[in-house]
Image: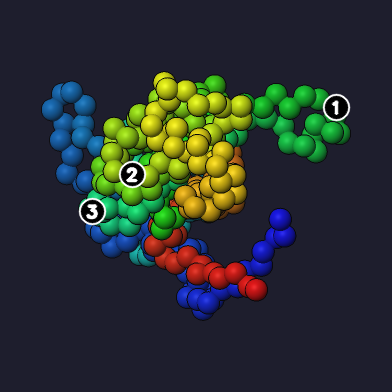
Amino acid sequence: FKKHTYALNNYREYNQALRQRGRFDIWISEDIISNWQHDDRVYDGTGSSVKYPNSTIEACHYIRLVYKLPLRQTQGFIENLLMKLGMDNLQYPDYTLLSKRLKQLNLTVPRFRKHEKPDDKIAAIAIDSTGLKRFGKDEWHQEKHKVNAKRSWRKAHFAVDEGHFIQGAVLTDKNTMDDQVVGTLCQSIITDIEHVSADKMYDTNAVYQTLEDHFPDAEIVIPPKDNTFADEAHHPKRMSNLIGCFALGIIGWQSLRQYGKRNVSETAMQRYKKIVGNTLHSRKFENQSKEMLLGCSILNRFTHLGMPNSYRLA
């Protein structure tokens, strides 16, 4: 296929949105400053109450991920920022506290979705996964020293709606199959869905049944795996997709069933790796999971600021 070219019809607005992504006041607002720390702490013999609320810890980690800072540099950045703002009465969290409190954040789904309250209905959602690197040498080191990669990674599973907002995200180890996480992703979405799409790795009866249990009225668009044949044991919607591919061909079936809506999940994974990064900085799995959710929240916040409105050139 010939690669298509695209142009923007909202260049000025999107250019302004890109500039706003570098502003730190979208992460440290007046509400966060006013509730930065608890000066009146309770000591009841079982341990004192926390000095910094979760909103403060989250804001520090958002800045850390956006500006790609290590923990100690994040502490220095926040310290200097409060000094420049004239907030001499406020103290900054220690880098060790930022690390310990990360896994304690009450964060189960990405924040900054389209609305504070759940949407009444989501037109379409796409499910996919990608790998996030834990550790390992880069290509230059492997080629120069003739060593193996010895890489290890985690798998990030995303559920993205048609507006490029990440509605659900789950981090698993690299040995977890994609179809095993569909139920967990669906639990984070409590609204009606009209269209669900995924690639052929999700083509199993269990996935179809899980999607139908959560979204009974949704159109499920998953291409069949290679060498899949008709069987009475198949889910009815899976059989419909299988027969449609045989009758229309894969290209005709994709066009008829609007399989192209799945591109939003591919775009979300590319945006995550380009903006947040393809490497996890935390060492423990609990911290890595929260770090991934914070990264998805950052993407949702950037989506709020503005997205390109493109059209294909002739």
**What residue is drawn where x is 44% and y is 59%?**
302
The secondary element bearing badge 1 is classed as loop
* Image quarter in which the C terminus is found: bottom right
63 relative to 86 in the view: left or right: right
- Residue at figure coordinates x 41%, y 21% from the top left: 233
Q: Position of residue 105 (x, y in %)?
A: 32, 37
For the view shown, which residue lies furthest in the left direction? 44
Q: CA distance from mark 3 to mark 1?
A: 56 Å
Evaluate if marks 1 and 2 touch, with contact meaning CB atoms under 8 Å apart.
no
Label 2 amino acid?
Ala
- Say if residue 217 shows up in the picture: yes
Q: Which residue is identified by label 2?
A: 218
Tell me how far mark 2 sits from mark 3, CA to CA: 14 Å
Q: Which mark is residue 120?
A: 3
Element under disc 3? loop
Toward which corner of the image does residue 305 lie, by quadrant?
bottom left
Instruction: Tell me the distance, in whole angstroms, between the alpha carbons under discs 1 and 2.
Output: 51 Å
Give the x, y percent position of residue 260: 52, 52
Tell me if mark 1 has few (under 14), some (14-19) or many (20+) residues whose alpha carbon lies within 10 angstroms of its own.
few
Report crowding for label 2: few under 14, some 14 to 19, many 20 or more residues within 10 A (C-alpha).
some
Asked if residue 160 lies left or right of residue 229, the reply is left
- Which three-letter amino acid code belongs to the residue tagged 1? Lys
Horizontally, is 31 left or right of 207 in the view? left
The percent coordinates of residue 210 (x first, y second) are 35, 30
The residue at the point 15 percent across, 35 percent down is 42
The circle drawn on residue 262 is none
Taking depth in this image into account, of 10 and 208 the one nearest to the observer is: 208
Residue 130 spot, x, y in % from top left: 55, 38
Residue on which the image places disc 1: 146
Q: Nearer the viewer, residue 245 or 60?
A: 245
